[in-house]
Image (cartoon, coloured by chain):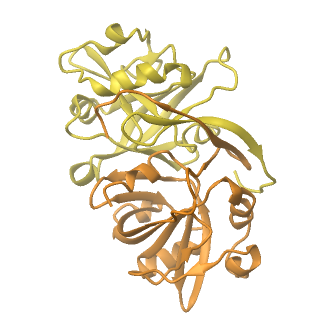
Chain colours: A yellow, B orange
Amino acid sequence: MSRVYQLIEPGPVVLLTTAHKGRANVMTMSWHMMVDFEPPLIACVVSEANFSFAALRATRECVIAIPARGLAATVVKVGNVSGRKVDKFTTFGLTTVPAARVVPPLVAECFANLECKVSDTRLVRQYNLFILEVLQAWIDPAQKGPKTIHHHGFGTFAVDGQTIKLKSTKP
Amino acid sequence: MSRVYQLIEPGPVVLLTTAHKGRANVMTMSWHMMVDFEPPLIACVVSEANFSFAALRATRECVIAIPARGLAATVVKVGNVSGRKVDKFTTFGLTTVPAARVVPPLVAECFANLECKVSDTRLVRQYNLFILEVLQAWIDPAQKGPKTIHHHGFGTFAVDGQTIKLKSTKP
């Protein structure tokens, strides 16, 4: 759990799953950041225009799933369609896996999955900004050195390239 | 201003400048995200352990400066030293430029500079989380196609690699 920040701090595009009224949904998200190390707290903005907004507000649970670059085309498709009418998991070939501590599912194809509960809603009304606490974190050991994608707007992404290591005293 | 989100959404490491009691300071920051498009709102977490925290809270002004990969070594040095005792601009060879609408300086070596005011402090006490409004944005046209760096912890960074473009209907 103390290493969760290393997944979110670089700013990858992520998927967010919710479950509401017996149905799971998934959206694409890029507006998120770390807020604390341990327990890991994450802030995110989910527009009230998104179908996921009502689910997140009502159930106070979600999963943040982090896709590697091989899923980029799927990530864009997920982001372009609303879950109001479509089962996006089936339509776009994403496999749901039951989570341990929340109802929303994990996404099997993602290299990391973070089970979260909403822990603060003070800024939801004004900004659609949720504070999440990570309850459980999963890494897929079969996906080694995953490269993530970073959204520059309108479907343009930077893929992780070279890794550089510099001497630092800070986490 | 409507394109500011394209700079922040990918999750680059940034520099944050402040000015307090007649002295400017600069820190390295990776915990930030977009909150709204226009006017651009940005959330960020500045630890109360950082010298910049008191300046940001007291003056309610800052500049977010975005460095390209060539500044990576400088960015790490800025992050490893406190401004309490050191003038980090002079020590690390960063050039300050007066901002138009705030007192904290721009950083000439960065390819983008965002002049910001603090617009919401409701989550400062509990999480050190500030909501900033971007008042003025600057881009250096001489730095073309800048590659940014993304922090994975302890001085390890992913540099932007390949750019991919996929068909998307979303900003």
Residue B142 occupies quadrant? bottom right
Drawn side of residue A92 relative to residue A146, left or right: left
Whether residue B170 is situated above or below residue B128 in the rendered picture: above
Viewer can see residue A53: yes
Residue A78 percent coordinates (x, y): 34, 22
Query: Which of the two residues, A39 or B37, is positioned nearer the viewer here?
Result: B37
Q: Residue at x 57, y 31 (%)?
A: A148
Q: Is residue A137 above or below residue A119?
A: above
Q: At 70% across and 67% down in the image, what residue appears?
A: B78
A101 left or right of A83 in image? right
Q: Quadrant of the C terminus of chain B?
A: top left
Q: Identify whether A70 is placed above or below A31.
A: above
Residue A63 in view of the camera: no
**Rendering coords of residue B18 (x, y %):** 53, 77
Left or right placement of residue A41 versus residue A170 in this view: left
| Residue nearest the viewer, comparing A109 with A106 | A109
Q: Nearer the viewer, residue B52 or B39?
A: B39
How many marks the image carries: the answer is 0
Residue A4 in the image, given as x and y percentages of width and height: 59, 37
- Give the residue at the far bottom of this rendering: B22
Identified at 55% across, 27% down, the residue is A137
Tell me where residue B67 sits by quadrant. Answer: bottom right
Quadrant showing the N terminus of chain B: bottom left
Q: Is residue A82 left or right of residue B151?
A: left
